[in-house]
Image (cartoon, rainbow, N blue to C red):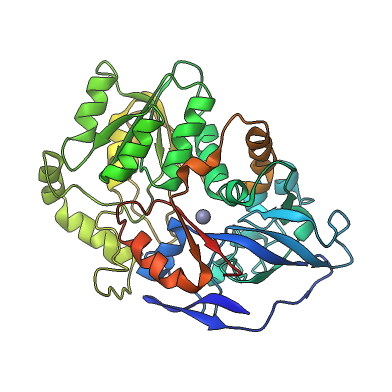
Amino acid sequence: MRALVWHAVGDIRLDTVPDPQIEQPSDAVIKLTASAICGTDLHFIRGTFSNMQQGTILGHEGVGIVESVGDEVRNFTPGDRVVVCSTVSCGVCPPCRAGHTAQCDNANPNGPEAGTCFFGGPQATGPVNGLQAEKARIPYAANTLVKIPDGVSDEQAILISDIFPTAWFGAELADISRGDIVVVFGCGPVGQFTIASAFLMGAARVIAVDSHVDRLAMARRQGAFTVNFEREDPVAVIKQLTGGTGADAVIDAVGVDSQHAHHGPASDEAEQKADKFKQEVEQVAPETHPQEGNWVPGDAPTQALEWAIASVKKAGRLSIIGVYPPTAEIFPIGKAMNKNLTMKMGNCNHHTIIPHLLELTRSGVIDPVGVLTNVEPLSNVIDAYKHFDKREPGWIKTELMPQA
Ligand SMILES: [Zn+2]
Ligand SMILES: [Zn+2]
């Protein structure tokens, strides 16, 4: 079959690889009918999340049809339409039963202390071959797959494989209650769904910060107040939009590839912090291979966090769903501590959240397809990655057609 394979930082290839097989009685094999490219995938190619194993198939977002199941998979039958949870979970260990399926004790082959196991990730996460392929082996399939209800399309379901639940999880961590003013840093696909989730949870006002006009336009269509950090100082504008006190809750949907301002009033601060940001990039991305404007790490790993802490109110809440590698030791703890902030963060507990979002979609409360901007055949996957990596206008979220 064809699959997108990670060979090295800056080197991904569409290869022909052996078809996946059932290896454990808890496995299933699915034929993918939809896949997608995610911002998380870019970290592995830019080098801002290291220790990938050569030969790993990339991708952790998928929708498909069950082809075969192992003896321990009692809840699926070949032919079932399923959405894949990006994180693998067993469903029976204590963290899974408490809803923390991203911290499953059994899923990660490196042991219970190794942390989240997800598809198409670095060595420490499994590694488990990913979903930008024609077929995939699904470990712990009874829990890692979720049936798609009638009335929910593949296009809708692919957005519920990872990015919508991650956003929902971020909004839950922010403890939003009715009347809150919520700031979302980052208006990529996860940021867009974070805005939608915050509104669904009762936020009275959502302020969305980014520098890309197409992303800000999509945020404004959802009803968010938009702030372009290349034109304005985001912290000053947020203070102004919150009566001087700051936001009740701030959600970081950016992560390690954060950018500082290069123009406008916020670029002065970036110039003062240039050395600090440079050291941070060296710490999180010891090896990089930029080529013709692609695979360039973000130039200010803590910029989004700095702004988040500065723009939340005293004793406010900070939620972090943007991805940071375990090697990042760069958090501005002093500023957060002296403001009495409550902070929650982590990898999304997909299995716990996905059924609810499928039901919100089926019942028409929300149509996730509004965030999807591109549909490409798997044969064009590398080209699509390059457009998305450069954050080109119009390339917000790309669905891949695995059989095309
Ligand atoms: Zn993703
Ligand atoms: Zn578990």
Which of the pair 97/41 is nearer the observer?
A: 41
Q: Quadrant of residue 300?
A: bottom left
* Point 59% across, 71% down: residue: 133
Q: Quadrant of residue 149?
A: top right
Tell whether 94 sits left or right of 225.
right
For the C terminus, which image quadrant? bottom right
Q: Quadrant of residue 277?
A: bottom left
Could you say where residue 67 lies in the image, as x and y percent from the top left? 78, 67
Could you say where residue 350 lies in the image, as x and y percent from the top left? 63, 47
Compared with residue 289, is residue 194 higher up or lower down, i.e. above or below? above
Compared with residue 114, is residue 307 higher up or lower down, i.e. above or below? above
Could you say where residue 24 lies in the image, as x and y percent from the top left? 80, 72
* Point 62% across, 31% down: residue: 364
* Point 66% across, 84% down: residue: 18
Which of the pair 210/134 is nearer the observer?
A: 134
* Point 59% across, 46% down: residue: 156
Could you say where residue 95 lies in the image, as x and y percent from the top left? 70, 47
> Does residue 47 appear in the picture of this structure?
no
